[in-house]
């Protein structure tokens, strides 16, 4: 891969990480004030939990749900 292809992937990964941190910051602000010293730590913990939740859903996605989603537009 050339340097430019790696830059594109890094930009996309940066946007994904930024989105996760925005959601984590929103959830963390429910429990801790944004100007509290431990806000960054709570935000990191929430983002880690969100990441684990997404991986858990992807790992244990039932095959029958995928089968049903693939058959939505097909006649029986």
Image (cartoon, rainbow, N blue to C red):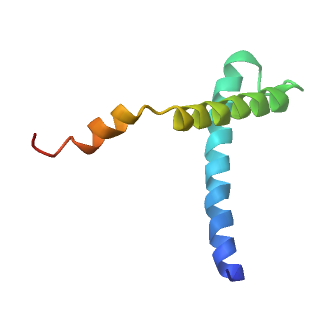
Give the residue displayed 43% in from the left and 31% down from the top.
62
In this rendering, position of residue 49 left or right of residue 60: right
- Visible in this render: residue 59? yes
Residue 6 spot, x, y in % from top left: 68, 73
Q: Is 14 left, or right, of 54 in this rendering?
A: right
Check the image and name the residue furthest to the bottom: 2
- Quadrant for the C terminus in the image: top left
**Residue placed furthest toward the right:** 37
Number of numbered discs visible in the structure rendering = 0
The residue sitting at 66% across, 48% down in the picture is 18
Seen in the picture, residue 14 relative to 41 is either above or below; the reply is: below
Q: Quadrant of the N terminus?
A: bottom right
Q: In the image shown, does 16 or 39 lie closer to the viewer?
A: 16
**Residue 46: quarter of image:** top right
On the image, the x and y values in percent for residue 7 come to 68, 72
Asked if residue 35 shows in the view, the reply is: no
| Residue at the image position 72 percent from the left and 16 percent from the top | 31
Q: Quadrant of residue 25?
A: top right
Q: What's the residue at 35%, 39% (across, down)?
A: 66
**Residue 59 vs residue 42, the one in the foreground:** 59
> Where is residue 30 drawn, in percent x and y?
67, 18
Residue 9 spot, x, y in % from top left: 64, 66
């Amino acid at each position: 891969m050339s340097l430019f292809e790696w830059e594109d992937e890094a930009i996309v990964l940066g946007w994904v990480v930024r989105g996760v941190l925005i959601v984590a910051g929103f959830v963390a602000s429910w429990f801790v004030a944004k100007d509290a010293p431990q806000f960054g730590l709570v935000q990191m913990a929430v983002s880690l939990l969100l990441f684990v939740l997404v991986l858990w859903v992807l790992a244990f996605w039932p095959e029958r749900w995928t089968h049903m989603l693939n058959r939505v537009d097909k006649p029986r």
